[in-house]
Amino acid sequence: MDQMSAQAVQNQEINALYASLKQDPNFLENIDQKPFTDTPLHAAASLGHTHLALELMSLKPSFGKKLNQDGFSPLHLALQNGHSQTVRQMINHHPELICVRGREKITPLHYVAETDDTELLAEFLLACPSSIQDLTIRGETAVHVAVKYKNIRALKVLLGWLHRTNKEEVLNRRNEEGNTLLHIAVIGNQFEAVEMLINKVKRNEKNLRGLTAYDIAEETSSEENEEIRSLLRRVGVRKAESLPEFDPLSKFLSSKEGIIERLLRAFIYIEKELTLEMRNVLLVVAILIATTTYQGVLSPPGGVWQGEGIISPNIKTTNALKDTAKTGISSSVAPIRPHFKNPVGKVVMSSKSSFTRFMTANTIAFILSTGVIIFHGRPHTLILHASLGFLAYGYSTVIEIILLPNFFTRFLVIGCWITFASVFALKVCLYIVKALAFNLWWHPRISLVATNFIYQIRPKCLQSLIIFAHRLKMQHQVSK
């Protein structure tokens, strides 16, 4: 049937649809009352009648998500029968249909991941990005399906999309057997898939049988998978027996809580109690305090000495000048430096104990407020952190300019820098801990690379550190 004939047939079908509605206005509503049934939309989609399908979805949008007795939606049927044009038009008008879970919770995206239609797969991902998170009853994402059915072309598209959208954490999902994508690729003896995944997933994960990908490769040891085993050894994939043993959740809950774990629990509790509005108010207050304290240094109480300065009489200087006048010979080889009584630019009240107390309190307030601003940020605000560092440098420089060079001045400057550097280092350490222990990094690939690198190092002290980090991760999961 040519295109014009097909369009004429569809027009006749649309006319017939409205004729049926004239006879019985509840015609479509009666069908919709049944929880599982073949609707007219199912029939139109399975036959590839695009216009009729779009007309039915316009009249009854709920038909698009309704399953028939076999557990398939209209979009599932259109895909199964190869009507790609109908599929494209349906998702163009209703992209949410891509997330409809059919039989065994298989979505249209799962189905397309099995096929070679990579262009349609890319269109699905673009139309409904959240569909990549959908799991079947076997705990499989579309990426699991592509690897399982050895669809390398689809796997390349999925990996490229996940990388470009910063959603690579999906690659570390496990199926119902606890197998990662690397496990599945090794089970299927897919060297190309293993090669593509080896730098994108955590390599030393165990499945529910307690086996790593290398253990599975050893189980099915043959000449065919020698290339895979060689690759796994080369990148540091280890046997399960050589990896640190982690306590199960029940044993962790039964164990004594450590000091660090208590601090983490308290930190999480405080973080949960602070609402977004409270955090914003705290940030505004911190900024105001930092501004006020900085202004207190730029314009100190009593101001600074102006003019050219007054030379203060110095006994040694005066005696030396008298001796020189009498004898004509200088009694001192070293040049005589004048001592200024009121040095220009120095604080007028610098000798007062009250000013010392003011500067101490002002500096502490400045350091604490900038610390709050630093801790409020996320990794992408590191540029702001750098600007705060320059602000602290300016603060300490002003202190050196306006105060006399003595122990108190050095104490303030050094104390300011040590505290600021400690807060900044603590914040960076917090980012690293989140990346390694909690998997909460805003760019998951950093966590992935760090984890794979750490497992290549074998000293026992490092394994103890990994176990400790795992305990912190469990504490975080329990406390949040």
Image (spheres, helix red, strand yellow):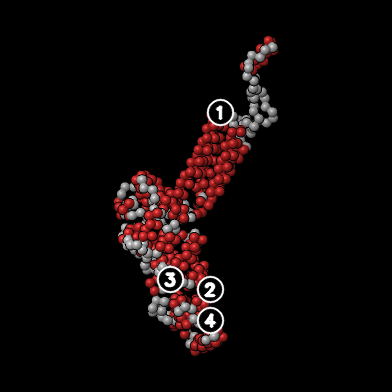
Q: Marks 1 and 3, how far apart in space?
A: 76 Å
Identity of the amino acid at label 3? Glu
Q: Nearer the viewer, mark 2 or mark 3?
A: 3
Vertical arrangement, residue 413 with respect to residue 274, above or below: above
Rendered location of residue 294, percent (x, y): 59, 40
Q: Residue at x 40, y 54 (%)?
A: 234
Q: Marks 2 and 4, how far apart in space?
A: 13 Å
**Which circle's residue, 4 or 3, is located before the other in the chain?**
4
Q: Residue at x 50, y 51 (%)?
A: 378
Identity of the amino acid at label 1? Asn
On the question of residue 265 being in view, the answer is: no
Rendered location of residue 370, percent (x, y): 53, 44
Task: Specify few, some or many for label 1: CA neighbours under 10 Å numbering under 14, 14-19, or 20 or more.
Answer: few
User: Which residue lies under the disc numbered 4?
Assistant: 51
Vertical arrangement, residue 58 with respect to residue 164, above or below: below
Identity of the amino acid at label 4? His
Q: Nearer the viewer, mark 1 or mark 4?
A: 4
Q: Secondary structure at mark 4?
A: helix
Q: Nearer the viewer, residue 218 or 146?
A: 218
Vertical arrangement, residue 400 with respect to residue 261, above or below: above
Q: Marks 4 and 3, how far apart in space?
A: 27 Å
Q: Marks 1 and 4, how far apart in space?
A: 87 Å
**Which circle's residue, 2 or 4, is located before the other in the chain?**
4
Q: Secondary structure at mark 3?
A: helix
Residue 406 image label: 1
Q: Marks 2 and 3, how far apart in space?
A: 21 Å
User: Which residue lies under the disc numbered 2?
Assistant: 92
User: Which residue lies under the disc numbered 3?
Assistant: 114
Task: Specify few, some or many for label 3: CA neighbours under 10 Å numbering under 14, 14-19, or 20 or more.
Answer: many
Q: Nearer the viewer, mark 1 or mark 3?
A: 3
Screen quadrant of the C terminus: bottom left
